[in-house]
Amino acid sequence: MFDPTTLFIIGLFLLVACGVVVGEVFTHFGQAALVGQLLVGIVLGPTLLGPALGLATVTPEFAGLQTLATFFILLMAGLGVSPEQLRATGVPSVLLGVAMFFVPFLTAAGVVHVLFPSFTGEIDLFVAVSVSITALPVLGVMLREFDLLETQFGSTLLSAAVVNELCAVTAFAVLLRVSSGGGNPWSAAALSVGTVLLFLGTVLAAYLLLRLLTSRPIWKRWVQGFRTSWNSRESGLALLIVVGLGAALYSSYLGLTFIIGAFYAGLLITPEVTGVKTHRAISFVFDAVTWGFFIPLFFVLAGYGTNFRDLGGVVILAAFVGLVVYAVAVKFLVGAGVALSLRWSPDEAFSAGFLVTSQGTVGLAMAVILLQSGVFTTQMFTIAAGAGLITTIVAPIGARPFVRAMKAARHRARHAYQPPPPEWVGTVYLPPGPERERPELPPTGR
C-alpha cells in the first residue's frame, strides 16, 4: 500500500504525462492541444477510469495545483498584452464584452427554468451567470496556440473577455450577497459595482504612475542599478510572481476573483518598466514553465473535476445537452454578430464567435464556491461545470477553420502586388505599372 505522498506523485505523473502526450497527438490532427488534455481529464477522472485508478475525487493537493495553474496562465496572458494594445481596442472590446455577458445572461435564466423546472429562481440565475462567462485564461491559451495573442484581433478579444468577466463577477457577487441574506439587493448591487470601480481605478493609477516614472531618466538609472546590485538568481521572475500574487490578493480582498488581479499584474509589467532585455528573459522562463507544466495540468484537472455520472437519467441528460447547445449558440451569435457590426471580416467574426464560447475557469470556480456553500447540489455542480467543459472543447475546434482562412487572407493581402510610385525623370512623367514602357528622352547633347 502506497503512502499519500506516493499516491499524489503517481496521480500527478499520470495526469501530466497523459495530458502532454495526448495534447501533442491532437495537434497533429489539426486540433488545439487543450482539447486532448480536457478529454484526458474526463477519461482519467470519476466519469470513466477514475474509480478503478483511485483518482475518483479531486484531492486538496490537486485543487491547490489547479488554483496555482490558473494564476500562472492569467499572469502569462497579461504579459503577452501591452496596455497600449488594450487601449487601442477601445470601444469595440467594451461593446463586445458587455454584449457577450448581458445577452446570454438575460435570456439564460428562462432557458434554464424551462430545461430544469425543479430548479429555483435563484439557481436559474446562478447557472445563467456561469454560462454567460468567457474564460479569460482559456481564451489566452487558445489565442497563443493560434499565434494571435499579440495581434489587434487577439487584444480586442482579451479586452472583451476582461469586461465580460468583470460583469460576471459583479453579477455573481450580487447574487451571492442576496442569496446569503445580505439585505437589500440594490445595496448589494451598488456595493459590488463600487468594488469593481475601486479595483479598476487602482489599476489605472498604477499604470499612469508607471508611465510617468518610465519617462524619467532617474527611474531608468534606478532600474539599472537595482538589476546590477541584486544577487539572487532569476530575480525578475521572482519579483513578477510576487507582484502577481499581491495583485491577486488585492482583487480577492475586494471580493473579486483572484484571476483578475493576476491578469492585470502581468499587463502592467511592460518592457518599459523592466527593460526590454529583462522583460524578454522573464517572459521566456515564465512561458516555458507555464506551457511545459501548468497549462497541460490545468486542462487535465478541468476535465478530471467533472463527473458526468451525476447526470443520471435520459431526461436530465437531454436537458444538459440542450443547455450546452444554447450556451454555444448564444455566445457564438452574439460574438460574431457584434464583430460583423464592427465591420470585421466574416472569417474574423466567426473565429471570434467560436473563441468566446469557452467558459472554463471562472465558471468552474463559481460552481465550486456554490457547491461548498450548499447552494449547489453535486448534480447542479456537474451541470454548470460540465457545460463549461464542453464549450471549452468546442471553442477551438469550431474556430480553427476560420482562423486558418483569416490568416490566409491576411497573408494574401500582405503579399499582394503594389504598383511602384510615380517617377519623374528630368521633366518626363513615368506613370506606375510594369506594362508601361519608359519613353525615350530627347538627346542632351552630351
Image (cartoon, rainbow, N blue to C red):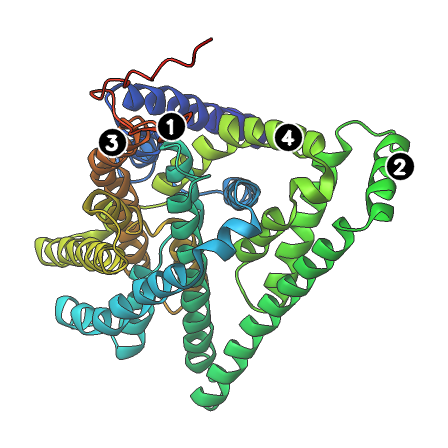
- The extreme front residue here reads 445
Q: Nearer the viewer, residue 154 or 166?
A: 154
Give how far apart the Cα atoms at labels 4 and 3 are: 28 Å
- At label 3, which amino acid type do we have? Arg
Q: Residues within 10 Å of mark 4 (few under 14, many from 20)?
A: some
Q: Is residue 301 above or below residue 95?
A: above
> What is the C-alpha distance between the residues marked 3 and 1?
39 Å
Q: What amino acid type is highlighted by mark number 2?
A: Gly
Q: Earlier in the sequence, mark 3 or mark 1?
A: 3
Residue 3 makes an appearance in the image: no
Q: Which residue is mark 3?
A: 404
Residue drawn at the location 33% of the way across and 69% of the way down: 126
* Label 1 Cα neighbours within 10 Å, binned few <14 / some 14-19 / many ≥20: few
Q: Residue at x 21, y 42 (%)?
A: 347
231 up-or-down from 312: above or below: above
Instruction: Say whether residue 48 is visible.
Output: yes
What residue does disc 1 label? Answer: 423
Residue 60 percent across, percent down from the top left: 53, 45
Query: Of the residues under marks 4 and 2, which one precedes in the sequence?
Result: 2
Query: Mark 3 or mark 4, which is nearer the start of the sequence?
Result: 4
Q: Nearer the viewer, mark 1 or mark 4?
A: 1
Residue contact between numbered discs 4 and 2, judged by CB atoms under 8 Å = no
Q: What whole-number distance in Å separates the C-alpha atoms at marks 1 and 2?
A: 53 Å
Structural distance between the alpha carbons of marks 1 and 4: 43 Å
Outermost residue toward the top in this view: 446
